[in-house]
């Protein structure tokens, strides 16, 4: 199985800050990576697919990059509504696997 | 609007069975792969099982093999869960893939249905 390692597991930042999360795959997954946002008590929501493509309707302050084993997710200017847990997920191979999640809080 | 609505969760004793359903609307169900993803209390997301658009290929996580069965019919996705264990307790989400196969984004999610396994 492909292991996905996210870091940090949590972070605290101020409104307007630039926030970055990394995701490392245990083997080359090309660009077959998605990023999801999950707010407390809610279902996950797709933000980024195919490594770097913004899903329709998602604000442009969210972005992502990377390929092979190393990926980065960025919020360019943190907003109060971005408080959530973020997950990366690979779809290069089955079983599909998720990172452990990064919880983003406001400082 | 594309929507998924899960049902069938509840309290079941260890060793018991439960059948989850996921009703799809707002898109052509037969064109897309579907998956079940679960989340244990306070934990992360775990993919459980997936089925391609035609139903011709089905995959399971090791934790589900031999106990869970995914199926699809008309506009509904199912997950038959047998021999349930305490560690199967979670919120179960169904998710639509963006393509007819598993190797794609999961772009629509249901609200989830909770499963509790306890005596």
Image (tube, helix red, strand yellow):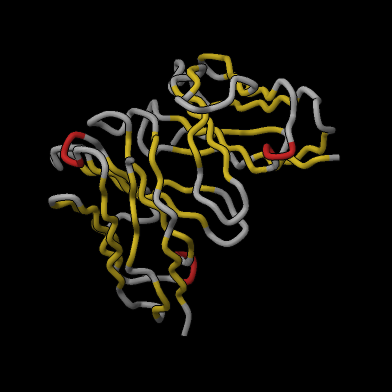
Side (left or right) of A53 relative to B15: right
Q: Residue furthest bottom?
A: B119
Q: Quadrant of the image for the N terminus of chain B?
A: top left
**B8 up-or-down from A43: above or below:** below
Q: Position of residue B83 (x, y in %)?
A: 32, 71
Q: Position of residue A6 (x, y in %)?
A: 64, 33
- Depth order, front residue of A15/A96: A15
Which residue corresponds to the image point at 14% horizontal and 52% vertical from the top-left? B73
Q: Position of residue A27 (x, y in %)?
A: 49, 23
Which residue corresponds to the image point at 34% horizontal and 56% vertical from the top-left? B5
**A53 up-or-down from B32: above or below:** above
Q: Residue furthest front?
A: B1
Q: Position of residue B80 (x, y in %)?
A: 26, 63
In the picture, residue A22 is in which quadrant?
A: top right
Which residue corresponds to the image point at 24% horizontal and 57% vertical from the top-left? B78
**A58 up-or-down from B24: above or below:** above
Which residue corresponds to the image point at 34% horizontal and 59% vertical from the top-left? B6
Q: How many marks?
A: 0
């Amino acid at each position: 199985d492909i292991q996905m390692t996210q870091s940090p597991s949590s972070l605290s930042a101020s409104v307007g800050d630039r926030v970055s999360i990394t995701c490392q795959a245990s083997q080359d997954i090309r660009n077959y990576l998605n990023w999801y946002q999950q707010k407390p008590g809610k279902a996950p929501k797709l933000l980024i697919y195919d490594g770097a493509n913004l899903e329709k309707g998602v604000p442009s302050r969210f972005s992502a990059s990377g390929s092979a084993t190393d990926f980065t997710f960025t919020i360019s200017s943190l907003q109060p509504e971005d408080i959530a847990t973020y997950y990366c997920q690979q779809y290069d191979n089955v079983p599909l696997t998720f990172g452990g999640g990064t919880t983003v809080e406001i400082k | 609007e594309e929507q998924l609505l899960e049902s069938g969760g509840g309290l079941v004793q260890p060793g018991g069975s439960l059948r989850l359903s996921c009703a799809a609307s707002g898109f052509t169900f037969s064109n897309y792969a579907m998956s079940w993803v679960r989340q244990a209390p306070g934990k992360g997301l775990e993919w459980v099982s997936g089925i391609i658009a035609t139903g011709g290929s089905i995959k399971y996580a090791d934790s589900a093999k031999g106990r869970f069965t995914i199926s699809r019919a008309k506009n509904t996705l199912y997950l038959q869960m047998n021999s349930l264990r305490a560690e199967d307790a979670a919120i179960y989400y169904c998710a639509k893939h963006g393509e007819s196969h598993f190797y794609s984004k999961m772009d629509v999610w249901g609200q989830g249905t909770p499963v509790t396994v306890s005596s």
